[in-house]
Image: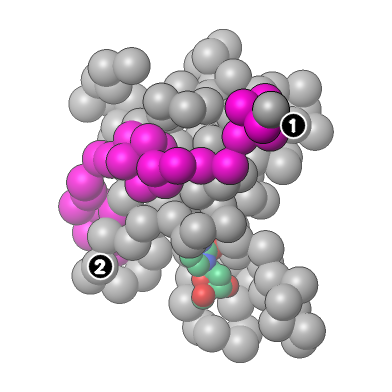
Amino acid sequence: MELSQDQIDTLLSAAQSAMEKAHAPYSDFQVGASVLYDDGTIITGCNVENASFGATICAERTALATGVTQGKSVIKALCVSNMTDTKITPCGICRQVIWEFSQTVPVICSNKDGDYKILTIGELLPHAFDLKSVE
Ligand code: THU
């Protein structure tokens, strides 16, 4: 889908706001994510860390799980931001979770200044695991 500059700017600022809510006392690496759904709704998430490190949930998965809870699953765009100069890309687990909801979605990968690059989930995760394709 072709994203308008307005949609990109709205997703960027929503991800940046969500980042402020991050619970990241162990890494001190705050991440925010925002997801645009087919009905125009934007749902956000932040990373939620845990003293048992493996229990940590990334910002992207927080947002997507919230979307499911609200009955939404058709995603049109996802944005991830953080508080460094680096335009971060979603981790491997998050790529597989994003792919669950769309095999073509554009992912806006941004830094603290709102600079961004856009990659599709197919570019980020070639050869995703697809249970439907197992014979
Ligand atoms: N993190 C995310 O929230 N999203 C990603 O795609 C990469 C990593 C979080 C997990 C952890 O709380 C912190 O960043 C450092 O890895």
**Magenta region includes residue 48:** no
Disc 1 crowd, CA 10 A, few/some/many (<14, 14-19, 20+): few
Q: Residue furthest top?
A: 39
User: If you read the primary sequence from the N terminus, does the residue marked by circle 1 or circle 2 appear first?
Assistant: 1
> Which amino acid type corresponds to the residue marked 1 in the rendered image?
Val
Tell me the magenta residue range.
Answer: 110-134
Q: Which residue is mark 1?
A: 68
Residue 80 placement (x, y as % from top left): 42, 51
User: Is 87 displayed left or right of 15 in the figure?
Assistant: left
Q: Nearer the viewer, residue 2 or 17?
A: 2
Q: Which residue is mark 2?
A: 86
Residue 93 placement (x, y as % from top left): 58, 57
Q: Residue furthest front?
A: 135
Residue 109 in the image: above or below residue 31: above
Q: Residue at x 29, y 53 (%)?
A: 110
Q: Nearer the viewer, residue 117 or 102?
A: 102
Q: Quadrant of the N terminus?
A: top left
Residue 16 seen by the camera? no
Residue 19 in the image: above or below residue 107: below
Residue 63 seen by the camera? yes
Among the 4 quarters of the image, the one containing residue 37: top right
